[in-house]
Image: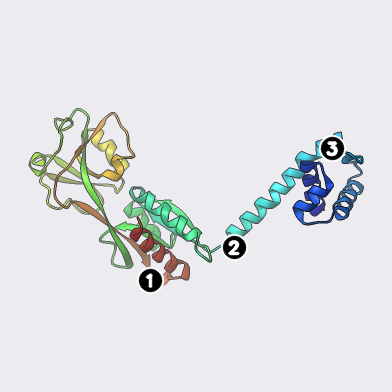
Amino acid sequence: MLREIQCFARVAERLSFSAAAADVGMSQPAMSQAITRLERATGVRLFERSAREVRLTAEGKALLAYAEQVIDSVQAFGAEAARLARPTIHLAYPPLVGTLAARIVRRLATRTPAVGVELRAAGRDEAARALADGEVSAAILATPAPARFVTAARFHVTVDHLAVPAGHRLASALKVGPAELAGQVLMTPGSRPWQGLPGRSRLVPDDFAAALDLVAAGAGLLPIPQLMVRTIRRDDVRFVPLEAGDLRITYALAWSKERVTPELMALVQAVQDALWTR
């Protein structure tokens, strides 16, 4: 009956048997027969027909919404079935490189055959654990990654700003250099202190957004990439340009050598391509 319901909805839209038939590649008699079959099956007259016009009956109008729901459900079923049949990999990534993660997803979606990607935003420790436990296929990790993982497609994120509390003496500075950082507490989201910066280092969870809460609370200052500065607006934190040489965070795509699949290799290629074509 699905075919007949689809024909009913098309005739209701066009109010013409011949036009509806042409839309779906049927003959006009075949379209009329489909509607007749549906009317017999339901016991309801759906259209008033004359030589000059086709009009929905009151019963036809009442049933049209249900017909459209059936068609929408069938289309949704097909789309979900196609998604489930498509190879899918799971990628953990730090929110800092979310734009890159989105670009990777788009590349793999246009690949033939397409590869689906389920994204999972996670800090370094959580991502490494999920990768070790097989919860994700790969992860973008700040280096050095744990030795048990294979890594490729390294890239750098420049750290060129300093987050300070709004009331801090450096909040109004036009720029900050290493000399102004002496005696300050510098927070590091991750596993390693900032190289080449004076001050006392404080390791915090690998989450820049959460670390900004600590900045606002006066727990320390936070070197931060411009990528974050462009997307965060807070009244309690100021972002001051930081001139501290070649300060950067290096990331790499990591995966377990025991879980290599064709889809994973497609992911590696997509990451490399995305990095080359920014």
Q: Label 1, secondary structure: give it.
A: helix
In percent of width and height, residue 212 lies at 28, 38
Q: Is residue 82 visible?
A: yes
Front position among marks 2 and 3:
3
Q: Mark 1 points at which residue?
A: 257
Q: Is residue 56 left or right of residue 245?
A: right
Front position among marks 2 and 1:
2
Going by the numbered disc 3, the residue's amino acid type is: Leu
The residue positioned 9% from the left and 39% from the top of the image is 180
Q: Mark 3 points at which residue?
A: 56
**Mark 3 → mark 1, Cα distance in angstroms:** 63 Å
Q: Label 3, secondary structure: give it.
A: strand
In percent of width and height, residue 135 lies at 44, 59
Crowdedness near tag 2: few (<14), some (14–19) or many (≥20) residues, C-alpha within 10 Å: few
In percent of width and height, residue 236 lies at 27, 29
Front position among marks 3 and 1:
3
Crowdedness near tag 3: few (<14), some (14–19) or many (≥20) residues, C-alpha within 10 Å: some
Q: In this view, does 93 lie to the left or right of 143?
A: right
Going by the numbered disc 1, the residue's amino acid type is: Lys
Q: In which quarter of the image is residue 64?
A: top right
Going by the numbered disc 2, the residue's amino acid type is: Ala
The residue positioned 26% from the left and 37% from the top of the image is 214
Q: In which quarter of the image is residue 92?
A: bottom left
Q: Label 2, secondary structure: give it.
A: helix
**Mark 2 → mark 3, Cα distance in angstroms:** 39 Å
Q: How is the image coloured?
A: rainbow
- Number of marks present in the image shown: 3
Q: In which quarter of the image is residue 270?
A: bottom left
**Residue 208 vs residue 2, the one in the foreground:** 2
- Residue 85: image tag: 2
Q: Which quarter of the rendered picture does the C terminus lie within?
A: bottom left
